[in-house]
Amino acid sequence: MLKNNYNYWLILILVLAFALRIFKVTTIPPSLNWDETSIGYNAYSIMKTGKDEWGEFMPVHFKSFGEYKLPTQIYASIPAIAIFGLNEFGVRITPVVYGTLTVLLLYFLTRELFAKSLFTNHYSLITAFMLAVSPWHIQLTRASFESSFSLFWFVMGSWFLIRGFNNKPKLLIVSMIPFVISVYTYNTARVFTPLFLFVVYLLNIKFLLKNFRYLAFSFLAFVVLVLPIVPFVFSGGAVARYKLVSITDDKGLIPRIEERRNLSKLPPLLTRLIHNRYTYNTFYFSKNYVAHFTPNFLFINGAGHRQHHVQGIGELYWIQLPFLLYGLNFLIKRKHGSLKILIPWLLIAFIPVSMTNDSIPNALRTLIAVPVYQIFTAIGLFEVLSMIKDPRSKIKVILFVLVLFIINFYIYLINYFTNYPIKYSRDWQYGNKQAVEYIKNNQDKYDLVVFTRHYGEPHIFTLFNLQYDPTKFQSLNNLERFETFDWVRVLRFDKYYFPDLRDEGTRYDDIVKANPNKKILFIGKKGDFPEYKEVLERINFLNGDPAFEIVEN
């Protein structure tokens, strides 16, 4: 009966996790961003033709906008799009499902970590609950983010790995499959997963040497399965992309070093020892790393990137802080074996992002750390309550903690479901779908449709929302792409043209002059058109600010 009660609680937690991720998922976040739209359209293209939007057959890397998306998220999106169609629900139901399943996997993982404890079920249920209601995890599983799917596979791999260490060594080999899939899902995992496995294997070397053949086979399995992506990792495209965000390739680094050297009053040798590429990169790496452990990031304001987090809310609930610290201290004092997994997991999680200079601190690239925080919180909460022996006192403490949590949770829910979509609809590229809907309903009247690229990548919103036939798109004679070293821009396909209407030569009058005797529909932002032009339609962001104006020549 006790076991069945735990199962009932687990089911309730999973229902809660699913509800928090599915509720209004098509409208909050307020629209599909261009990455979600690209993932959806490429999945649709593969489903229809076996090729991506570039005409590549079943690629391992999707060129997309030139950033080369990893394949797992796109291929995994195909079933839902086949069932529900190419729309918001078809794209977002996949992360909702694997987000909920990650809660279940973390429950099983925690049970394995504390299998010898009398309270393993308590720890596991509290951990699962904390992930189910986590603002960090909810945010990134209500939209199609590769990071959250990578976490799903990593948690699965860790579960099998821990079971392998718990005297089932054959599962060490099995664990390599989800670990490798995580590497095929998100770029951060390419650094994090191998580092994590290397450190964890070192910390458990005695067990592995006793089971050497499983160590050898698991290592071999990992290497063989990642081989297909190795050539790309060292390719020009991947290297160029990495240089855009890497601290080691910051264009301003050398000028800053030279400036400091020129201003230094120290002896020349000492000046060079202090002011050089290695010391500066070490400083920036350390600064970025520490930024992810600050109270401001974890408990007060969270990450600054508006798509990745509700602003003004911590990545974790502030009520978690005392229990998180106590749980960590509890495990350290008892030298618990779980720390051989959890400490490397947490400390390595922030290494890949610290090597970049883009949006620090970053919630998306560090989502992998979330389960560790929830486990520490669960241990701390349960052990604090266990110390209180008087039943009345325990009930009072439980009620006090519950009230504080409800306040925390309520503040988050109000911010996310009420304020967030209105304040930050622009950050989610809201308005593109509405613009394409106008195009869809009126395009037959026009010879040319001009859609500003001011807000970025209008072609993918056009393809997605028109459900444009991928076979036709791949074979168009007038498909024009402009490739730079770091990005790809579609300038034209079919009757659709995507200039910046503020650029010299592609303004309203220039386009009208270049296309005599053509009836043209223009979608631009406020100020793109002559004042005398009648506006056929205005599209606003959800806060009322103008997004698009639609006119004709």
Image (cartoon, rainbow, N blue to C red):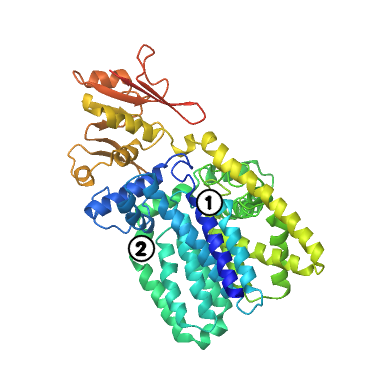
* Quadrant in which the N terminus is drawn: bottom right
Which amino acid lies under the numbered mark 2 shown in the image of this protein?
Answer: Ile
Label 2 residue SS: helix
Label 1 residue SS: helix
Q: Which residue is mark 2?
A: 229
Question: In the rendered view, would you say 274 is above or below 32?
Answer: below
**Residue 370 percent across, percent down from the top left:** 57, 59
Is residue 307 visible from the viewing direction of this image? yes
Residue depicted at 63% across the width and 76% down the height: 337
Residue depicted at 48% across the width and 44% down the height: 24
Residue depicted at 62% across the width and 61% down the height: 373
**Residue 365 percent across, percent down from the top left:** 51, 54
Which amino acid lies under the numbered mark 1 shown in the image of this protein?
Answer: Leu
**Residue 179 percent across, percent down from the top left:** 45, 68
Question: In the rendered view, would you say 445 is above or below 5?
Answer: above
Q: Which residue is mark 1?
A: 20
The total number of labels drawn is 2
Residue sitting nearer the eye, 134 or 232:
134
On the picture, is 480 further left or further right than 214?
left
* Quadrant in which the C terminus is drawn: top left
Is residue 277 visible from the viewing direction of this image? no
Q: CA distance from mark 2 to mark 1?
A: 35 Å
Name, please, the residue furthest toward the front.
Answer: 1
- For discs 2 and 1, the disc positioned in front in the rendered view: 1
Residue depicted at 36% across the width and 70% down the height: 225
Name, please, the residue furthest toward the top.
Answer: 532
